[in-house]
Amino acid sequence: MENITRDPLNPFPWYDLMRKNRPVFYDERNGIWHVFRYTDVKKVLSDHSSFSSSEGRVESSSNPIGSSIISTDPPRHTRLRSLVSKAFTPKRVQEMAPRIREIAEELAQKIADNDECDLVEDYSGPLPVIVIAELLGIPPGDRKKFKKWSEALVSGTSEGMDDTSTEYFDPQTAMAGYFREVIEMKRKNPGNDLISSLLEAELDGEKLSEFDLLGFCVLLLVAGNETTTNLITNALLTLSGNPEEYGKILNDRTLIPAMIEEVLRFRSPVQSMFRTCIRDTELGGFTIHNGEPVLAWIGSANHDDEEFTESEKFIMERSPNRHIAFGEGVHFCLGAPLARLEAKIAMETLLEKAGRVTVRKDAKLEPLGGVIVFGVQHLPVKTEK
Ligand code: HEM
Protein backbone atom coordinates (compact mmCIF):
# COMPACT_ATOMS: atom_id res chain seq x y z
CA MET A 1 0.00 0.00 0.00
CA GLU A 2 1.22 3.51 -0.85
CA ASN A 3 2.39 5.48 2.12
CA ILE A 4 0.10 8.52 2.31
CA THR A 5 -0.56 10.28 5.58
CA ARG A 6 -3.59 12.40 6.39
CA ASP A 7 -3.16 15.95 5.11
CA PRO A 8 -5.45 18.04 7.36
CA LEU A 9 -6.21 20.44 4.49
CA ASN A 10 -6.92 17.66 2.00
CA PRO A 11 -7.55 14.33 3.75
CA PHE A 12 -9.49 12.85 0.79
CA PRO A 13 -6.64 10.95 -0.96
CA TRP A 14 -5.84 9.26 2.37
CA TYR A 15 -9.51 8.32 2.91
CA ASP A 16 -9.66 6.90 -0.61
CA LEU A 17 -6.61 4.76 0.03
CA MET A 18 -7.92 3.54 3.37
CA ARG A 19 -11.40 2.73 1.98
CA LYS A 20 -9.79 0.61 -0.72
CA ASN A 21 -7.08 -1.09 1.35
CA ARG A 22 -7.88 -0.89 5.05
CA PRO A 23 -11.54 0.06 5.42
CA VAL A 24 -11.54 -1.13 9.05
CA PHE A 25 -8.12 -0.46 10.47
CA TYR A 26 -6.62 -0.97 13.94
CA ASP A 27 -3.91 1.58 14.73
CA GLU A 28 -1.61 -0.21 17.14
CA ARG A 29 0.22 2.98 18.04
CA ASN A 30 -2.74 4.33 19.99
CA GLY A 31 -5.15 1.38 20.13
CA ILE A 32 -7.89 3.06 18.06
CA TRP A 33 -10.02 1.42 15.33
CA HIS A 34 -10.60 3.59 12.23
CA VAL A 35 -13.65 3.00 10.03
CA PHE A 36 -13.85 4.49 6.52
CA ARG A 37 -16.68 3.04 4.39
CA TYR A 38 -20.14 4.60 4.18
CA THR A 39 -22.11 1.55 5.37
CA ASP A 40 -19.64 0.79 8.20
CA VAL A 41 -19.53 4.41 9.42
CA LYS A 42 -23.34 4.49 9.45
CA LYS A 43 -23.37 1.29 11.51
CA VAL A 44 -20.86 2.61 14.07
CA LEU A 45 -22.78 5.88 14.48
CA SER A 46 -26.23 4.31 14.76
CA ASP A 47 -25.76 0.92 16.48
CA HIS A 48 -25.68 2.16 20.06
CA SER A 49 -26.02 -1.34 21.49
CA SER A 50 -22.53 -2.14 20.10
CA PHE A 51 -20.92 1.31 19.91
CA SER A 52 -21.53 3.53 22.91
CA SER A 53 -21.38 7.33 23.17
CA SER A 54 -21.20 7.26 26.96
CA GLU A 55 -18.42 4.78 27.71
CA GLY A 56 -15.15 6.29 28.77
CA ARG A 57 -16.64 9.74 29.37
CA VAL A 58 -15.90 11.61 32.55
CA GLU A 59 -19.02 12.58 34.48
CA SER A 60 -18.34 15.45 36.83
CA SER A 61 -19.55 18.96 37.50
CA SER A 62 -16.46 20.37 35.77
CA ASN A 63 -17.30 18.43 32.63
CA PRO A 64 -20.96 19.07 31.75
CA ILE A 65 -20.48 17.94 28.13
CA GLY A 66 -19.17 14.58 29.36
CA SER A 67 -22.64 13.95 30.77
CA SER A 68 -24.73 15.84 28.20
CA ILE A 69 -27.04 14.37 25.56
CA ILE A 70 -24.25 13.76 23.01
CA SER A 71 -22.37 11.58 25.55
CA THR A 72 -25.29 9.37 26.56
CA ASP A 73 -26.91 6.18 25.24
CA PRO A 74 -30.55 5.13 25.32
CA PRO A 75 -32.57 5.00 27.54
CA ARG A 76 -31.07 8.11 29.21
CA HIS A 77 -30.48 9.67 25.78
CA THR A 78 -34.10 9.07 24.70
CA ARG A 79 -35.43 10.92 27.73
CA LEU A 80 -33.02 13.85 27.39
CA ARG A 81 -33.65 14.16 23.65
CA SER A 82 -37.45 14.20 24.15
CA LEU A 83 -37.13 16.89 26.80
CA VAL A 84 -34.84 19.24 24.89
CA SER A 85 -36.81 18.71 21.66
CA LYS A 86 -39.85 20.21 23.39
CA ALA A 87 -37.99 23.51 23.69
CA PHE A 88 -35.59 23.47 20.71
CA THR A 89 -38.33 23.16 18.09
CA PRO A 90 -38.28 23.70 14.29
CA LYS A 91 -40.77 26.55 14.88
CA ARG A 92 -38.37 28.33 17.21
CA VAL A 93 -35.62 27.98 14.60
CA GLN A 94 -37.84 29.28 11.77
CA GLU A 95 -38.86 32.25 13.88
CA MET A 96 -35.22 33.28 14.04
CA ALA A 97 -34.90 33.67 10.26
CA PRO A 98 -35.55 37.45 10.06
CA ARG A 99 -33.11 38.12 12.90
CA ILE A 100 -30.44 35.87 11.32
CA ARG A 101 -30.83 37.87 8.10
CA GLU A 102 -30.41 41.16 9.97
CA ILE A 103 -27.21 39.96 11.64
CA ALA A 104 -25.89 38.58 8.33
CA GLU A 105 -26.66 41.84 6.52
CA GLU A 106 -24.80 43.87 9.08
CA LEU A 107 -21.74 41.62 8.86
CA ALA A 108 -21.87 41.30 5.05
CA GLN A 109 -21.92 45.07 4.66
CA LYS A 110 -18.44 45.15 6.15
CA ILE A 111 -17.24 42.63 3.56
CA ALA A 112 -18.85 44.66 0.76
CA ASP A 113 -17.24 47.89 2.01
CA ASN A 114 -13.73 46.42 2.10
CA ASP A 115 -11.97 44.96 -0.92
CA GLU A 116 -10.16 42.41 1.23
CA CYS A 117 -11.02 40.74 4.52
CA ASP A 118 -10.95 37.49 6.46
CA LEU A 119 -14.21 35.60 5.96
CA VAL A 120 -13.76 33.64 9.21
CA GLU A 121 -12.97 36.62 11.40
CA ASP A 122 -15.53 38.96 9.83
CA TYR A 123 -18.43 36.76 8.78
CA SER A 124 -18.63 33.00 9.27
CA GLY A 125 -17.11 33.20 12.79
CA PRO A 126 -19.31 35.84 14.44
CA LEU A 127 -22.64 34.90 12.80
CA PRO A 128 -23.33 31.56 14.60
CA VAL A 129 -22.07 32.91 17.95
CA ILE A 130 -24.47 35.85 17.82
CA VAL A 131 -27.33 33.60 16.71
CA ILE A 132 -26.82 31.03 19.50
CA ALA A 133 -26.30 33.71 22.12
CA GLU A 134 -29.59 35.34 21.07
CA LEU A 135 -31.38 31.98 20.89
CA LEU A 136 -30.34 31.20 24.46
CA GLY A 137 -31.13 34.72 25.67
CA ILE A 138 -27.55 35.71 26.57
CA PRO A 139 -26.67 39.40 26.95
CA PRO A 140 -24.83 40.69 23.82
CA GLY A 141 -21.87 41.91 25.91
CA ASP A 142 -20.87 38.31 26.74
CA ARG A 143 -20.51 36.97 23.17
CA LYS A 144 -16.75 37.36 22.88
CA LYS A 145 -16.28 35.20 25.99
CA PHE A 146 -18.32 32.42 24.37
CA LYS A 147 -16.36 32.41 21.18
CA LYS A 148 -13.16 32.06 23.18
CA TRP A 149 -14.51 29.29 25.38
CA SER A 150 -15.98 27.30 22.54
CA GLU A 151 -12.77 27.56 20.50
CA ALA A 152 -10.74 26.41 23.50
CA LEU A 153 -13.10 23.48 24.03
CA VAL A 154 -13.04 22.31 20.44
CA SER A 155 -9.25 22.39 20.21
CA GLY A 156 -8.96 20.72 23.62
CA THR A 157 -11.18 17.75 22.75
CA SER A 158 -10.15 17.21 19.18
CA GLU A 159 -6.59 16.08 19.82
CA GLY A 160 -7.15 12.43 20.61
CA MET A 161 -10.08 13.20 22.94
CA ASP A 162 -7.87 13.81 25.94
CA ASP A 163 -10.70 14.40 28.38
CA THR A 164 -8.40 14.85 31.32
CA SER A 165 -6.38 17.79 30.02
CA THR A 166 -6.76 21.15 31.73
CA GLU A 167 -7.56 22.85 28.41
CA TYR A 168 -10.69 20.73 28.25
CA PHE A 169 -11.84 21.37 31.80
CA ASP A 170 -11.05 25.04 32.32
CA PRO A 171 -13.35 26.60 29.70
CA GLN A 172 -16.10 24.16 30.67
CA THR A 173 -15.85 25.18 34.30
CA ALA A 174 -15.91 28.85 33.33
CA MET A 175 -18.89 28.37 31.02
CA ALA A 176 -20.76 26.26 33.56
CA GLY A 177 -20.29 28.93 36.25
CA TYR A 178 -21.58 31.58 33.90
CA PHE A 179 -24.60 29.54 32.77
CA ARG A 180 -25.52 28.78 36.36
CA GLU A 181 -26.02 32.52 36.88
CA VAL A 182 -27.99 32.94 33.65
CA ILE A 183 -30.25 29.99 34.53
CA GLU A 184 -30.93 31.49 37.93
CA MET A 185 -31.79 34.81 36.27
CA LYS A 186 -34.19 33.11 33.78
CA ARG A 187 -35.83 31.11 36.56
CA LYS A 188 -36.78 34.38 38.22
CA ASN A 189 -37.53 36.32 35.02
CA PRO A 190 -38.45 33.95 32.18
CA GLY A 191 -38.28 35.38 28.67
CA ASN A 192 -39.02 34.22 25.12
CA ASP A 193 -35.73 32.34 24.84
CA LEU A 194 -34.48 28.75 24.72
CA ILE A 195 -33.19 28.63 28.32
CA SER A 196 -36.58 29.76 29.66
CA SER A 197 -38.34 27.10 27.53
CA LEU A 198 -35.87 24.42 28.65
CA LEU A 199 -36.66 25.32 32.26
CA GLU A 200 -40.35 24.73 31.52
CA ALA A 201 -40.02 21.53 29.44
CA GLU A 202 -41.58 18.52 31.17
CA LEU A 203 -41.88 14.80 30.42
CA ASP A 204 -44.12 12.57 32.57
CA GLY A 205 -44.07 15.22 35.27
CA GLU A 206 -40.25 15.39 35.27
CA LYS A 207 -38.09 18.33 34.27
CA LEU A 208 -34.45 18.65 33.20
CA SER A 209 -32.13 18.78 36.18
CA GLU A 210 -29.97 21.90 36.49
CA PHE A 211 -26.93 19.78 35.62
CA ASP A 212 -28.57 18.43 32.42
CA LEU A 213 -29.64 21.93 31.44
CA LEU A 214 -26.14 23.23 32.00
CA GLY A 215 -24.62 20.43 29.92
CA PHE A 216 -27.03 21.13 27.10
CA CYS A 217 -26.29 24.89 27.05
CA VAL A 218 -22.53 24.33 26.98
CA LEU A 219 -22.93 21.64 24.30
CA LEU A 220 -24.96 23.98 22.08
CA LEU A 221 -22.17 26.52 22.04
CA VAL A 222 -19.55 23.93 21.28
CA ALA A 223 -21.56 21.83 18.82
CA GLY A 224 -23.19 24.76 17.08
CA ASN A 225 -20.56 27.47 16.62
CA GLU A 226 -17.43 26.06 15.08
CA THR A 227 -19.39 23.61 12.92
CA THR A 228 -21.62 26.24 11.33
CA THR A 229 -18.66 28.59 10.90
CA ASN A 230 -16.88 25.82 8.99
CA LEU A 231 -19.92 25.07 6.84
CA ILE A 232 -20.08 28.69 5.63
CA THR A 233 -16.28 28.95 5.22
CA ASN A 234 -16.10 25.59 3.40
CA ALA A 235 -18.93 26.70 1.08
CA LEU A 236 -17.03 29.82 0.01
CA LEU A 237 -13.77 27.90 -0.30
CA THR A 238 -15.43 25.25 -2.48
CA LEU A 239 -17.24 27.75 -4.71
CA SER A 240 -14.03 29.70 -5.14
CA GLY A 241 -12.35 26.56 -6.46
CA ASN A 242 -15.30 25.77 -8.77
CA PRO A 243 -15.91 29.00 -10.73
CA GLU A 244 -18.49 27.46 -13.07
CA GLU A 245 -20.65 26.27 -10.20
CA TYR A 246 -20.14 29.65 -8.55
CA GLY A 247 -21.47 31.33 -11.69
CA LYS A 248 -24.60 29.17 -11.59
CA ILE A 249 -25.28 30.19 -7.98
CA LEU A 250 -24.79 33.88 -8.75
CA ASN A 251 -27.37 33.58 -11.55
CA ASP A 252 -29.84 31.48 -9.61
CA ARG A 253 -29.97 31.82 -5.81
CA THR A 254 -32.57 29.05 -5.55
CA LEU A 255 -29.65 26.62 -5.99
CA ILE A 256 -28.18 27.66 -2.61
CA PRO A 257 -29.84 24.93 -0.45
CA ALA A 258 -28.65 22.17 -2.83
CA MET A 259 -25.18 23.74 -2.92
CA ILE A 260 -25.07 23.67 0.89
CA GLU A 261 -26.03 19.97 0.96
CA GLU A 262 -23.19 19.23 -1.46
CA VAL A 263 -20.71 21.24 0.65
CA LEU A 264 -21.86 19.23 3.68
CA ARG A 265 -20.96 16.08 1.75
CA PHE A 266 -17.87 17.33 -0.08
CA ARG A 267 -16.19 19.19 2.80
CA SER A 268 -17.99 17.89 5.88
CA PRO A 269 -17.52 20.32 8.81
CA VAL A 270 -17.40 17.33 11.18
CA GLN A 271 -15.03 14.73 9.76
CA SER A 272 -15.19 12.09 12.47
CA MET A 273 -16.91 10.99 15.67
CA PHE A 274 -15.76 8.70 18.46
CA ARG A 275 -17.54 5.71 19.94
CA THR A 276 -16.49 2.94 22.33
CA CYS A 277 -17.23 -0.68 21.45
CA ILE A 278 -19.29 -2.25 24.27
CA ARG A 279 -19.60 -5.82 22.96
CA ASP A 280 -17.41 -7.79 20.54
CA THR A 281 -18.65 -6.80 17.08
CA GLU A 282 -17.81 -7.92 13.52
CA LEU A 283 -17.11 -5.11 11.10
CA GLY A 284 -15.60 -5.53 7.63
CA GLY A 285 -14.17 -8.94 8.53
CA PHE A 286 -12.54 -7.81 11.79
CA THR A 287 -13.67 -8.24 15.37
CA ILE A 288 -13.72 -5.04 17.37
CA HIS A 289 -13.52 -5.96 21.04
CA ASN A 290 -15.47 -4.74 24.02
CA GLY A 291 -13.80 -1.62 25.43
CA GLU A 292 -11.94 -0.57 22.27
CA PRO A 293 -12.31 3.00 20.95
CA VAL A 294 -13.56 3.53 17.40
CA LEU A 295 -13.20 6.57 15.16
CA ALA A 296 -15.91 6.72 12.48
CA TRP A 297 -14.72 8.83 9.54
CA ILE A 298 -17.78 10.77 8.35
CA GLY A 299 -15.61 12.73 5.91
CA SER A 300 -14.53 9.50 4.25
CA ALA A 301 -18.03 7.96 4.21
CA ASN A 302 -19.24 11.05 2.35
CA HIS A 303 -16.67 10.41 -0.41
CA ASP A 304 -17.40 6.68 -0.81
CA ASP A 305 -17.91 5.73 -4.48
CA GLU A 306 -20.20 2.91 -3.42
CA GLU A 307 -22.74 5.54 -2.36
CA PHE A 308 -21.84 8.66 -4.40
CA THR A 309 -21.07 8.55 -8.11
CA GLU A 310 -18.09 10.73 -9.06
CA SER A 311 -17.58 11.23 -5.35
CA GLU A 312 -14.52 13.49 -5.76
CA LYS A 313 -16.51 15.96 -7.87
CA PHE A 314 -18.50 18.86 -6.43
CA ILE A 315 -21.93 18.46 -8.07
CA MET A 316 -24.55 20.84 -6.69
CA GLU A 317 -27.45 19.07 -8.40
CA ARG A 318 -26.44 15.69 -6.94
CA SER A 319 -29.59 13.65 -6.34
CA PRO A 320 -29.98 11.68 -4.20
CA ASN A 321 -27.45 13.13 -1.79
CA ARG A 322 -27.60 10.91 1.28
CA HIS A 323 -24.61 12.40 3.06
CA ILE A 324 -24.16 11.76 6.77
CA ALA A 325 -22.58 15.10 7.67
CA PHE A 326 -25.09 15.49 10.53
CA GLY A 327 -24.55 11.95 11.77
CA GLU A 328 -26.92 8.98 11.72
CA GLY A 329 -29.34 7.37 14.16
CA VAL A 330 -30.48 8.63 17.55
CA HIS A 331 -27.74 11.28 17.85
CA PHE A 332 -28.58 12.84 14.47
CA CYS A 333 -27.71 16.52 14.84
CA LEU A 334 -30.38 18.36 16.75
CA GLY A 335 -29.18 21.66 15.29
CA ALA A 336 -29.33 20.59 11.61
CA PRO A 337 -32.34 22.80 10.75
CA LEU A 338 -30.62 25.80 12.37
CA ALA A 339 -27.28 25.10 10.66
CA ARG A 340 -29.00 24.76 7.25
CA LEU A 341 -31.00 27.96 7.77
CA GLU A 342 -27.97 29.95 8.91
CA ALA A 343 -25.81 28.74 6.02
CA LYS A 344 -28.56 29.50 3.48
CA ILE A 345 -29.15 33.02 4.80
CA ALA A 346 -25.40 33.62 5.16
CA MET A 347 -24.70 32.70 1.52
CA GLU A 348 -27.74 34.56 0.13
CA THR A 349 -26.84 37.71 2.02
CA LEU A 350 -23.14 37.57 1.21
CA LEU A 351 -23.75 37.25 -2.55
CA GLU A 352 -26.46 39.91 -2.46
CA LYS A 353 -24.30 42.46 -0.66
CA ALA A 354 -20.80 41.68 -1.86
CA GLY A 355 -21.23 39.86 -5.20
CA ARG A 356 -18.62 37.27 -6.15
CA VAL A 357 -16.37 36.86 -3.13
CA THR A 358 -13.34 34.67 -3.79
CA VAL A 359 -10.31 33.37 -1.90
CA ARG A 360 -7.24 35.55 -2.46
CA LYS A 361 -4.56 33.96 -4.65
CA ASP A 362 -1.84 34.63 -2.08
CA ALA A 363 -3.90 33.10 0.77
CA LYS A 364 -1.93 30.62 2.89
CA LEU A 365 -4.50 28.28 4.36
CA GLU A 366 -3.90 26.86 7.83
CA PRO A 367 -6.03 23.89 8.90
CA LEU A 368 -7.87 23.77 12.22
CA GLY A 369 -6.27 21.36 14.69
CA GLY A 370 -7.49 17.87 15.46
CA VAL A 371 -9.46 15.21 13.63
CA ILE A 372 -13.06 16.21 14.33
CA VAL A 373 -13.76 19.68 12.93
CA PHE A 374 -12.71 20.48 9.36
CA GLY A 375 -12.00 23.98 8.17
CA VAL A 376 -9.37 26.69 8.01
CA GLN A 377 -8.28 29.19 10.64
CA HIS A 378 -8.57 32.17 8.31
CA LEU A 379 -9.93 32.66 4.82
CA PRO A 380 -8.55 35.82 3.19
CA VAL A 381 -11.05 36.86 0.50
CA LYS A 382 -11.54 39.65 -1.99
CA THR A 383 -14.72 41.00 -3.53
CA GLU A 384 -15.28 41.34 -7.27
CA LYS A 385 -18.07 43.87 -7.62
C1 HEM B 1 -22.88 22.46 9.90
C2 HEM B 1 -23.12 22.45 11.18
C3 HEM B 1 -23.20 21.20 12.01
C4 HEM B 1 -22.70 19.94 11.79
C5 HEM B 1 -21.91 19.44 10.59
C6 HEM B 1 -23.08 19.13 12.93
C7 HEM B 1 -22.78 17.78 13.06
C8 HEM B 1 -23.25 16.97 14.07
C9 HEM B 1 -23.02 15.55 14.15
C10 HEM B 1 -22.19 14.72 13.16
C11 HEM B 1 -23.66 15.08 15.26
C12 HEM B 1 -23.76 13.62 15.73
C13 HEM B 1 -22.79 13.32 16.83
C14 HEM B 1 -22.74 11.84 17.18
O1 HEM B 1 -23.27 11.00 16.48
O2 HEM B 1 -22.09 11.54 18.19
C15 HEM B 1 -24.28 16.23 15.90
C16 HEM B 1 -25.01 16.18 17.06
C17 HEM B 1 -25.52 17.30 17.69
N1 HEM B 1 -25.53 18.59 17.22
FE1 HEM B 1 -24.75 19.23 15.48
N2 HEM B 1 -23.79 19.91 13.82
C18 HEM B 1 -23.90 21.17 13.29
C19 HEM B 1 -24.54 22.25 13.85
C20 HEM B 1 -25.22 22.23 15.04
C21 HEM B 1 -25.92 23.34 15.61
C22 HEM B 1 -26.08 24.72 14.96
C23 HEM B 1 -26.40 22.93 16.81
C24 HEM B 1 -27.21 23.67 17.84
C25 HEM B 1 -27.34 24.93 17.96
C26 HEM B 1 -26.03 21.54 16.98
C27 HEM B 1 -26.35 20.75 18.07
C28 HEM B 1 -26.14 19.40 18.15
C29 HEM B 1 -26.56 18.59 19.29
C30 HEM B 1 -27.28 19.08 20.54
C31 HEM B 1 -26.17 17.27 19.00
C32 HEM B 1 -26.37 16.04 19.89
C33 HEM B 1 -27.64 15.33 19.54
C34 HEM B 1 -27.84 14.06 20.32
O3 HEM B 1 -26.90 13.56 20.94
O4 HEM B 1 -28.97 13.56 20.31
N3 HEM B 1 -25.31 21.16 15.88
N4 HEM B 1 -24.03 17.36 15.15
Image (cartoon, rainbow, N blue to C red):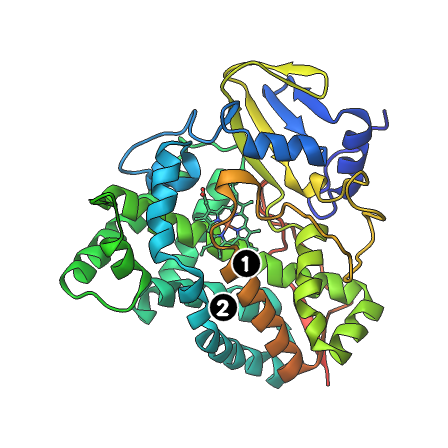
Question: Which of the two residues, 298 or 10, is positioned nearer the viewer here?
Answer: 298
Indicate the secondary structure of the residue bearing disc 2. Answer: helix
Q: Quadrant of the C terminus?
A: bottom right
Residue at (48, 55) in percent of width and height: 335
Residue 348: quadrant of the picture: bottom right
Question: Which of the two residues, 126 or 321, is positioned nearer the viewer here?
Answer: 321
Would you call the spot at circle 2 few (<14 residues within 10 Å), some (14-19), or many (20 or more)?
many
Between the C-alphas of marks 2 and 1, the distance is: 9 Å
- Report whether residue 287 is seen: yes
Where does label 2 land, which residue?
A: 127
Residue at (53, 22) in percent of width and height: 50
| 2 and 1 marks in contact (CB < 8 Å) | yes
Where does label 1 land, which residue?
A: 228
Residue at (71, 48) in percent of width and height: 9
- Report whether residue 378 is seen: no
Task: Inspect the image, locate mark 1, and give the three-letter code of the amino acid beneath it.
Answer: Thr
